Image (cartoon, helix red, strand yellow):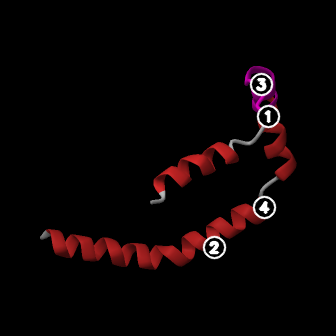
Amino acid sequence: MDERNEMRRWVETWKEAGPELERVRHREIKEADTLLILASLESAFNHAIRSLPLREGSGLVEMQKYFAKLHP
């Protein structure tokens, strides 16, 4: 099979799989146990709070300064 036909086949496969994958995604979101997920992330969040240095801001001001330098 040549490369063009193989690419065409992949495109068709994803077109066919797309709607089913979207249904799976929606079902998984709907069935997600948010409290369990948050509980599983709690220790990582607490570790970050304890170990990362405090910053006065979010970094947005610094980011805007860099963007301003890029804009002619």
Name the amino acid, label 4. Glu
Q: Find disc 2 in the rendering and name its residue.
A: 23
> Which residue is more in the foreground, 66 or 44?
66
The location of residue 33, given as percent across then percent down, is 82, 52
- Asked if the residue at tag 3 contacts the one at tag 4, i.e. Cβ–Cβ closer than 8 Å, the answer is no
Q: Find disc 1 in the rendering and name its residue.
A: 56
Instruction: Give the Cα separation between the discs numbered 1 and 2.
Output: 43 Å
- Earlier along the polypeptide chain: callout 1 or callout 2? 2
| Numbered disc in front, either 3 or 2 | 3
- Earlier along the polypeptide chain: callout 3 or callout 2? 2
Q: Helix or strand or loop: what does disc 3 sit on?
A: helix
Q: Find disc 4 in the rendering and name its residue.
A: 31
Name the amino acid, label 1. Glu
Residue 60 drawn above or below residue 4: above
- Earlier along the polypeptide chain: callout 4 or callout 1? 4
Q: Helix or strand or loop: what does disc 2 sit on?
A: helix
Instruction: Give the Cα separation between the discs numbered 4 and 3.
Output: 28 Å
Instruction: Give the Cα separation between the discs numbered 3 and 1.
Output: 19 Å
Instruction: Give the Cα separation between the discs numbered 3 and 2.
Output: 35 Å
